């Protein structure tokens, strides 16, 4: 497993068998937030991934023609997209996401990444202070994520601002106030307000990484500490549905001779 804090952008490879494996390009916006629990689910299915860290010295974004079978845009801690404290690479990432959508490449946006996906797909974002909260999510429609999205689950949201999905987005889950928490654009792009693979240590690292922290962060941290096992259980069907709906078990682009090279690409 790759160490997300090591600064290395090497592929994470499952070690079973010699068949070509699907590859996911993962854009990381802070040292503290990474795929978390999702890493094990990808590795267990022999899906490899590469982190791109544009915030780090010499860091890059993947090119629009990268030989990736999916793009994941992660959360951004205190960074947002609605004008108060915008991500420095926001415009570049919107263009990258638009190119991926146009090519039919699956996109998964998480937190700030969901805001980027919403903007790229014709929606937007609305200003909101940096918040850490645990939200009750309820599925909208029995067939969400091929029926694998749980009827009720939780979203741990550490995010500034809020994604506004485009008008043609399909809402898959919402909170008690009716806000979309999980939604779909087109055939294979998904936005999550919270990181479904969140680990307690990720929140702790975000709190230590930045001077700005959410109100009542320590109390919310204790809440997440008491439900880590539950979050792990809820992730299992979510990942099954995501892998199916993004076709990450099908023939990889690299095997088909795609041109872009993950280890040297840059926007």
Image (cartoon, rainbow, N blue to C red):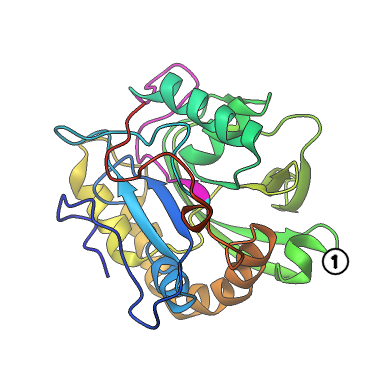
Is 45 contained in the magenta span?
Answer: no
Q: What element carries label 1?
A: loop
Instruction: Give me the residue at 18% from left, 36% from top.
Output: 56
Q: Crowding near pointer 1: few (<14 within 10 Å), some, many (20+)?
A: few
The magenta span reads 70-87
Find the residue positioned furthest to the bottom. Answer: 16
Let me know if residue 42 appears in the view: yes
Residue 46: where, in percent of width, then height? 45, 74
Asked where in the image residue 57 lies, by quadrant, the reply is top left
Q: State left or right for residue 208 relative to residue 129.
A: left
The N terminus, quarter of image: bottom left
Residue 169: where, in percent of width, then height? 77, 38
Is 80 contained in the magenta span?
Answer: yes
Pick the front one: 141 or 189: 189
Q: State left or right for residue 10 relative to residue 27.
A: left
Instruction: Give me the residue at 66% from left, 29% from top.
Output: 121
The C terminus, quarter of image: top left
Find the residue positioned furthest to the top. Answer: 83
Determine whether 213 is above or below 123 in the image.
Answer: below
Determine whether 31 is above or below 14 in the image.
Answer: above
Q: In this figure, which residue is indicated by the disc labeled 1?
A: 142
Pick the front one: 64 or 115: 64
Could you tell me what secondary structure mostly forms the magenta stretch? loop
Determine whether 144 is above or below 42 in the image.
Answer: above
């Amino acid at each position: 497993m790759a160490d997300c804090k090591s600064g290395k952008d090497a592929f994470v490879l499952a070690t079973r068998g010699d068949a070509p494996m699907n590859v996911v390009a993962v854009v990381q916006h802070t040292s503290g937030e990474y795929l978390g629990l999702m890493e094990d689910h990808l590795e267990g299915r022999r899906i490899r991934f590469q982190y791109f860290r544009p915030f780090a010295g010499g860091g890059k974004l993947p090119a629009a023609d990268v030989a990736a079978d999916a793009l994941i845009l992660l959360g951004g801690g205190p960074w947002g997209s609605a004008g108060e404290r915008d991500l420095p690479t926001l415009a570049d990432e919107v263009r990258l996401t638009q190119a991926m959508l146009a090519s039919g490449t699956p996109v998964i946006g998480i937190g700030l990444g969901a805001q980027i996906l919403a903007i790229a797909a014709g929606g937007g974002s609305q200003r909101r202070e940096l918040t850490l909260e645990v939200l009750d999510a309820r599925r909208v429609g029995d067939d969400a994520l091929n029926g694998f999205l749980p009827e009720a689950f939780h979203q741990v949201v550490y995010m500034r601002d809020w994604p506004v999905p485009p008008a043609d987005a399909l809402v898959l889950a919402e909170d008690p106030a009716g806000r979309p928490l999980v939604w779909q654009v087109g055939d294979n792009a998904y936005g999550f307000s919270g990181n479904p693979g969140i680990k307690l240590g990720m929140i702790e690292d975000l709190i230590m990484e930045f001077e700005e922290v959410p109100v009542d962060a320590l109390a919310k941290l204790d809440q997440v500490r008491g439900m880590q096992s539950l979050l792990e259980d809820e992730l299992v069907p979510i990942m099954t549905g995501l892998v199916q709906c993004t076709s990450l078990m099908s023939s990889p682009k690299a095997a088909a001779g795609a041109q872009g090279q993950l280890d040297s690409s840059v926007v």
